[in-house]
Each structure stands twice: as structure tokens, then as C-alpha cells.
Image: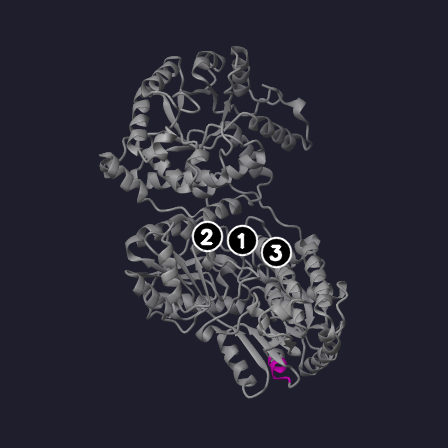
Amino acid sequence: MASVFEYAPAPESRSVVDIAPSYGLFIDGEFTEAADGKVFKTVSPSTEEVLSEVAQAGAEDVDRAVRAARKAFEKWSALPGSERAKYLFRIARIIQERSRELAVLETLDNGKPIRETRDADLPLVAAHFFYYAGWADKLDHAGFGADPRPLGVAGQVIPWNFPLLMLAWKIAPALATGNTVVLKPAETTPLSALFFADICRQAGLPRGVVNILPGYGDTGAALVAHPDVNKVAFTGSTAVGKEIARTVAGTRKKLTLELGGKGANIVFDDAPIDQAVEGIVTGIFFNQGQVCCAGSRLLVQESIQDELLDALKRRLSTLRLGDPLDKNTDIGAINSAEQLARITALAEQGEAEGAERWSPACELPASGYWFAPTLFTNVTQAHTIARDEIFGPVLSVLTFRTPDEAVAKANNTQYGLSAGIWTEKGSRILAVANKLRAGVVWSNTFNKFDPTSPFGGYKESGFGREGGRHGLEAYLDV
Amino acid sequence: MPTTAPTAHALSDVTASDSTLRRFLHGLPGVDAVGLEARAASLGTRSIKTTAKAYAIDLAISMVDLTTLEGADTPGKVRALGAKAVRPDPTDRTTPATAAVCVYPDMVAVAKEAVAGSGVKVASVATAFPAGRAALEVKLADVRDAVAAGADEVDMVIDRGAFLAGRYLKVYDEIVAVKEACGQSTRLKVIFETGELSTYDNIRRASWLGMLAGADFIKTSTGKVAVNATPANTLLMLEAVRDFRAQTGVQVGVKPAGGIRTSKDAIKFLVLVNETVGEDWLDSHWFRFGASSLLNDLLMQRQKLATGRYSGPDYVTVD
């Protein structure tokens, strides 16, 4: 953005976080090396700087962690709910106290802007622990019978887009309901989970209740397949989700999957245009579009297409891309080289299939993984970029003429995680929302999260709900 | 830079009758209050440091309409205000002058003399400020007085009663008449008193109404009610002037007034300008702050940047 009012850099200080040169696995309340001594490096996506070396859990470590969790389960599940709540409240408060440190850490390890980790991720992480702490002693009144029981050991595998938030979504309800946990963070973003392990110790959480096993897909596969795991929870790609479903099929393990999405963001001609533009930006450029519920398909009523696209392009020209630690950065780095390659390939395919590509003038930093915010117009349902999840800052714009056509196009996807409706007409919001086959439908807003609100998908976006009272069910024998 | 010109042909039919005007104003895109306020708040988190802050403070000083609108105003007070507008910080001559001094019509001549030769403008709140509850003839006489005394700018209040009753054409006609009374060389700022319009939809309609009628500036408020300029209503008005220019080619200025007291607040407003309408409006010809106490805080912040330490209220002049 060329302007006479250039903002001087306003970097958040890195000194608030102390990253050790190496980290172990967190098993039974202790940091330990992997049985076979394997380690991997985690890098900062914005600079490619190596942040730390992390132990890589193998099958033997998974077995150790599950056994520790099994042992801890006896005492943890026998505690009165009010006692478990105390630990959860304590964890929530420590997260708040250390939120600046955790926000900087998450930005370093993930590449997303500090503005988002500071203002969105961390407040939500703490809120989830507070919320489920509140449920821990009220499970008898949650609508699942008089005395719902925990399932046992939960094996949880989480993605790299919201490392700490996904951890909170998984661990908070599991602990509140009396389960113990073995969690595998993503290989590109293990650090905040390891800091969380330290928070568990700080909170005096009994040994073995939470175990953290950094590693790659094979670590996750070993955890999912472990015979003594009672519950599997996975957030990530649809392909891996299908594999997990196959592994778990025929066992007595309970399973929830939160997978991909290709959310439709529907803008009617009577929408509040300026706010819709903001919502479209939030929908697809929040966290560089690396959001499973991103509004990656924009469905615009034909009559306002030009006006809306002009406004959107003007708005995209003001997005600030660069150092994620700068408090004024809107768009940070893509999480990994692999992800960048995937986004690049899909965008090229969009061009090859005849869609029109547009990006604002925007300088990409020399090192790190970057992708400019990108719009595709002249997209139809037949284009790959309208069907496949891109998981990056790429928006496909389609048009419609009638509400029925909007609904038909919105539902014409193998996914069904989220959707958005923009209109000033209340009756239309209700009518359209009822017809959309998506787990979350936002109206006149997008990507709004709250611990009290359940989240989950239709079709290939998975099954089961996280968050809210519904989120308890996945961790209770009901 | 586009200058004020007759409203483009495309919109000339809109004001043919009360019903065409109503249909047009009610056909403007709606405003989602939650989304508008969220956007204004998120722009408020921009971190403006060092060189950018120094630039913003000087820019803000140059945009201040230094205002005194008290029943107890005296020629002496207005002269002091004028001197301050011309030379805000006598200890540092690099400090820019303010854009204007803003006074009641009977003080225009005094103010004019106080700022003579400095380039600082004299603005006057005419049209039975602040309530505007007077006959049109009275308002026009008020305007003519101010213009005759040499006012460079007239700040008029709209008839909120007529606006809220849906008599848009009456409000429109009044603005047109006042604009005519201003003549060619006096710029007209139209004050909506956004706190009394109560909904954002109304503020957007009032903005368009004012611009259609020939306002050179649209201004949030008088500073005399509970809710005056806010980041959200200023953001909304900036969107309106941006859209109006896109449709007609005519550029209109924006003036938030009342309640902006600190440099931090002023900088937040400049960020709104920068990221909504951009550098075309980052100039005192197109953006103003209506304020009385803001200037001293800007001066103290400026001294802090220059010396590295805070001085105190006695290191800047009282009016």
C-alpha cells in the first residue's frame, strides 16, 4: 500500500518467550526423550529459522503414554466434578496470565499474525477452559442422563492451523468429563502444546492426565490404532479422516472427525455491503485462509457483482502482508513449504481452467512461505477451485440470481462445515439458513467462535460436535 | 484532486420530489451496526509508532478546527484562540498551524483579524446553532452575517426534527439555500448531530442527503449532545464520501467533532481515514477535527517525541 501515512514497524517483542533448544515428549507428567531417540526440527514459517528440536514419538512412546493415561484415568475420573473444575479453572487462568508469551510463541511457530493470536486465539483458548470448567460439576444436568460416565483414554490428533485453540477444543471437554488425554500436535507446530504441558505442571494437574506426543502422521496413526484408546478425536484433512475411520471401524472406539470444508459465503443484493466486504475478508483471509470453515466460495447475487467486487478489491489493497510479529500485519506466512506448494498448484490449476486471477499489488518477503491474497472470478461449479479445499488465501467468486440457486450452489459440495448469509432481510436469513447443509451458518458475520456454540460438519466435513453442551457428548458414555 | 462541482447528472433526478428522494435514500445499502463497530474497533488496534506517530501528530494538528462555542466567549478569548491557532507551540516554531478557528457568527470579525495573513481559516457555526430550531429566514440571516464578516467556512446544523419525520426534501432544500447564502468562496460544513439521528442507517442517509445538496464537508455533531464523534460513525461517513466520489466524481470532506480529546484518539481517526479513503483525504482540506482540548494533548505528545520526556499541562498554553 503506497501511502503518505506509512506505519513504522511495530514488532511485538520476542523476549517474552523463552524457547529451549530442544524439547522432549510429555508423558506421565515428565518430559522425556523418544524411545528410539528420534527428533525433528520445527521452523518459523515467516523466516525459515529453526526454532527448536523436538522429540518425535514412535509406537513405543505412544504405548507408554496411553498406559500413563490409563493409570491416571482411575483417579481422575473418580474425582468429584468440582475438583476437576478447579484444575481446569487454574489452567484457564494460567493461560490468561501467560497469554502474551503464548501468542508470540504461536506466531513464531505457526506464521499467523500476532494480531490474530493475541486478539482471537488466546482469548478463545482461555474461554474454552473456563467454559468446560463450568460444566465439570454439572454433567448430571447436561441432558445425557443422570450419571454420564467418561469414556477412558482419549487419543487426540490436531492440526497446525490453530495449534493451541484446537488443543483447547480437544482437551478442555475431555478433562471436564473425566477422561485422560494423549494428544499429538502437528509436526509443524508442536511448541505451544509443549508449553501447555508445562502449564499442566504449573497447575498441579495429576501426572498422566495429559500427555503430549509430538510427531508426524505415523505417530498419529499409532495413537489412533492403539488398542487401549477408548475415544479418538481428529481435526485435519478429509483424506486422513477417512483413513482414521477405517482404522477405528469395528473397534469399540468412539470417533469424532472435524475435516475439510469449502464454505459458501452468500451475499444477497440487499446486504450491508461494507460489512459484507469485511465479512468476506474475515471469511477467507483470516489465518491466511488456513481455516477449515473458511468462506472460500463467495456466492454473489448477479445484480451487485460489479459493485461488490470493486469494493472487495479496494479492500484487499489495504491488507498488510509481512512480518507476523508486527502488530499491524493482517496477513502472515503460510504454515509450511508443502502447504505453499499445494496452494500454488491449485491456484495455477484455477488459471489453467480459465478462471480469472487477481491479487493486489503486494510485495512478498524474500524468505519464508508467502502467498498473496488472491481472488478468482468467472468461476463455475465445474472448476476445481470451486470444489477442492485450497486451505489458503484464495477466494473463488461465483454468482447466482435467485435464493434457490444460491442454496443449490452452496449445497453442491462434498463438504458441509460452514456457510454465511448476508442480507438485511431477517426472514431471508431464516429461510436460507434452514436449507443450507452446513454445521455452522453465520449471518451478517463470519468466522465468529464461542465456546458455548457447537461446531462440526455435514458430509465429508466430518461428524460429531465440538464446543457447547453438544461437545460434552463426544466424551461421555451416553 | 477532484474539486467541488455540480452533482453529476446521474443523481439529479433523485431530488425531484420528496418520494424520489426518500426512495433513493432508503435504497442505499444498509449498515450492520455490529460489523461497523467491529471494523472501527479493529482499526483502532493499529500500532502507530515513532516516525509514523510524529507524522500523524503534525497532520492532526494541521487538521484541528480549534473551537470555542460558549455563551461566555469574549473578544479577548477569541483573539487568544486565534493566536494559538496560528502558533500552537511558541517554544517550537516547526509546529504546524491548525486548520481553522471555529466561533459563533458574532465573533467572526474578531477571529478574522486574529489570524489575518496566517492562512488559518475562520469557521463559523451559523444556522441557529446548535439546535437549528429557527425559521429558515433566521438561519439564512445568520449565515449571511457570518459570511459578511469574512467567514471562510460555515458549519450548519440540519433540521433533525424534519429528518427524523422523514421530510427529507425540506432538509435538502434548507441545505441548498444555506449553500447558496455561502456563495462561491465560503465552504459549507453540514452537521448531522449523529447522536440524535440514532441509527447508522440514518447517518448514511443524512450523509448522502448532505452531499446531494452540495455540502463541502459532512460533520458528525455539534459537540453539544451526549454522543458526538465516534470511530464507527466517522468510518461510516468516510465510506459515504468514498462512495459519493465514486458515483459523482465530487470529493467531500469529513469532520468528526466533539469528544476527541487525546492524541491516541486522533491517531485512530487518521488510521480510519488512511485505510478507508486513503491519502486523498489525508489533508486538512478534506479532513478536520472539531475540538477544543485535543490540541494541547497533541502538543504535549509532540514535545514528548522531540525531547523524550513528558512535560506537563503548564508547558502548553491555556486558551
Query: In the rendering, at what x and y percent does residue A147 appear?
Result: 65, 75
The residue pinned by badge 3 equals A123
Left or right, residue B63 beside residue A89: left
Which of the two labelled residues, at mark 3 and mark 2, occupies the earlier sequence position?
Answer: 3
Left or right, residue B184 beside residue A131: left
- Numbered disc 3: secondary structure: helix
- Numbered disc 2: secondary structure: loop
The amino acid beneath tag 3 is Pro
- Numbered disc 1: secondary structure: loop
Which of the two labelled residues, at mark 2 and mark 1, occupies the earlier sequence position?
Answer: 1
The residue pinned by badge 1 equals A322
In this orientation, which residue lies closer to the viewer: A262 or A18? A262
Which of the two labelled residues, at mark 3 and mark 1, occupies the earlier sequence position?
Answer: 3
- Of tags 3 and 1, the one toward the viewer is 3
The amino acid beneath tag 1 is Gly
Circle 1: is it few (<14), some (14-19), or many (20+) Cα within 10 Å?
many
Distance from the alpha carbon under mark 2 to that under mark 1: 10 Å
* Image mark 3: chain: A
Query: In the rendering, at what x and y percent does residue B304 appear?
Result: 65, 31
For residue A362, the mark is: 2
Q: Is B117 drawn above or below residue B188 in the view shown?
A: above
Looking at the image, how many numbered discs can be counted on the residues? 3
Query: In the rendering, at what x and y percent does residue B252 appear?
Result: 37, 33
Looking at this rendering, what residue extends furthest in the front direction? A146
Write down the quadrant of residue B147 in the picture. top left
The range drawn in magenta is A221-226
The amino acid beneath tag 2 is Cys
The dominant secondary structure in magenta is helix
Q: Quarter of the image containing the C terminus of chain A?
A: bottom right
Task: Decide whether residue B197 is among the magenta residues.
Answer: no
